[in-house]
Amino acid sequence: MTKKWWHDKVAYQIYPKSFYDSNGDGIGDIPGIISKLDYLRDLGVDIIWLSPCYQSPLADQGYDISDYYNIDPCFGTMEDMEQLIAEAKKRNMYILMDLVVNHCSDEHEWFRRACEDPDGKYGNFFYLRDKKDGELPTNWRSYFGGPVWEDLPGTNKQYLHVFHKKQPDLNWENPELREEVYRNINWWLDKGLGGFRIDAIMNIKKALPFRNYTSDRADGLCNIYEMLREADGIGEFLGEMRDRTFRKYDAFTVGEVFNEKPDELSDFIGEDGYFSSMFDFNETIFGGSPKGWYDAKPITPDDYKKCCFESQAKTGDIGFLSNIIENHDEPRGVSRYIPEGDCCTESKKMLAALNFMLRGLPFIYQGQELGMENIPFGSIDDVDDISTHDEYRVALDAGLTPEEALKAVSKFSRDNARTPMQWSDEINAGFTTGTPWLKVNPNYTKINAAAQLDDADSVWHFYQKLIALRKNPAYKQTIVYGKLEPVWEAVHNLMAYYRKDDKTLLVVGNYQREEQSITLPSPYNQVLLNNFKEVMEEDGVIRLQGYQVLILEICE
Ligand code: GLC
Ligand code: CA
């Protein structure tokens, strides 16, 4: 395998609106990010992915872009952005922006022009269909609920939006649109970006001609995946995009890829793939129900292990997955993957090590390094996220009481990850001197960066050690490139695997509160990381304490 500059890196996702507010308006901003670069460098982060901060009406918190060449004033200016790139570079860090090109905002100039002249050039930038009485062009349900069709203002047409109605889908079949996208990507790469995280990209190819699919709910609509499953040929778009943009810059790209066809993996992330990497969502989609969040099944430690190993086996050494515990679309991983009642410093560290040592690129989402947890919502009015509001309504329609519905959607709400970053125990967790745009998690007095930086045993310091281990020249080859081999796969509530290359490492986590013993197949010569003070061992038998995790270097 040809070595690439990004293979051994560690990435960190920033959700700008909630990271750090520098001017007291309650909204995180780019100067705020710049002021925290040293914090990230000290942690060991190399690559920073920024969720969108382009000009946007923020209907979907920036994933609805009205100008791809401008920064939204609430986040700062283009000069701020340029300064961020420069300051990152000084610290050997790279900035990734979010590439949101399945759709733009209905406030984008292209869309305005399409409304003015639907049969003209810009009408063909979107998917428009003639409006018929009492009948929609298709029966597809949008990701955020309701039909994907909306009236095109001032015309007798309708436009397609697979996400929110303020996010009209762009017509990738139109070469003129694709040119506009490539021009924008290159313009940003010329500014010195390290690359992009690529949003919702599997939606750019639609199955044509459009048709109806069997409906799966009382609303008479069908899941959008019914259509996407039939869409062939996305590779032509993705290959063209790579050749026209990323490849020339040796940029790092990570795709938000769902549902790729099994034999396509190497096209996506192989040696000359469309992307450098793609996220592993196997754990996050586990237990999902076509009925909605209210019907989703919780994930157990054994399920979690199975999901991780499945992805690892599927990927092998074809390429590098990007491994996450959470992101801005998911609840907090520690609240989700650690059994209820067991969320504590030790179990958080165990989850961190088990995920971090998998083959692939580790991505840390802001606050994950502190073990930030889900927020208890007092009422649905405390929720900002459009997706949670939709799922709440779905739950009510299914007959749940308002209390039950709130409880059900709270577990999955995207706002869990979007509450302000907890910097200190000062007012508003030190995030802002004003009123935060979204409520701060009340547990900030206990969970915050200032306290953890002062405490050598904190979750933060554990993440710092994990990163340092990945970068340690003695282990780097093994941790970055080594094969992953599961061990004791059938043992209940135990997750263990070898990483093998020039060294052999054993990662083992006791995924339960009770003790559990393991018999080492061969002796170890070093404990590289332990979330407890000691290793209780006798004659090759290790008695693991509840939620203990060990990274051992095995003798050869
Ligand atoms: C992706 C983003 C999500 C957004 C959606 C539409 O899934 O991660 O936050 O709502 O795309 O852009
Ligand atoms: Ca601000």
Image (tube, grey):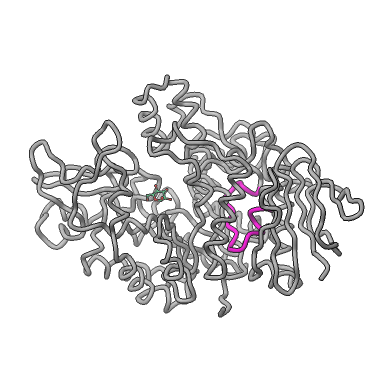
**Total residue callouts:** 0
Left or right: 36 in relation to 391: right
The answer to whether 24 is drawn above or below residue 499 in the figure is: above
Which residues, given as a range, are shown in magenta?
A: 354-369
Question: Residue 147: image x %, image y %?
Answer: 24, 40
The x and y percentages for residue 342 are: 69, 35
Q: Residue at x 49, y 76 (%)?
A: 271
**Residue drawn 57% across and 36% down?**
374
Query: In this view of the protein, can residue 22 be seen by the observer?
Result: no
Q: Quadrant of the C terminus?
A: bottom right
Q: Residue at x 51, y 56 (%)?
A: 280
Q: Position of residue 521 (x, y in %)?
A: 80, 60
Residue 174 falls in which quadrant of the image?
A: bottom left
In the depicted view, which residue is nearer to us: 526 or 316? 316
60 left or right of 432 in image:
left
Q: Residue at x 48, y 46 (%)?
A: 285
Residue 276 x %, y %: 48, 69
Depth order, front residue of 147/167:
147
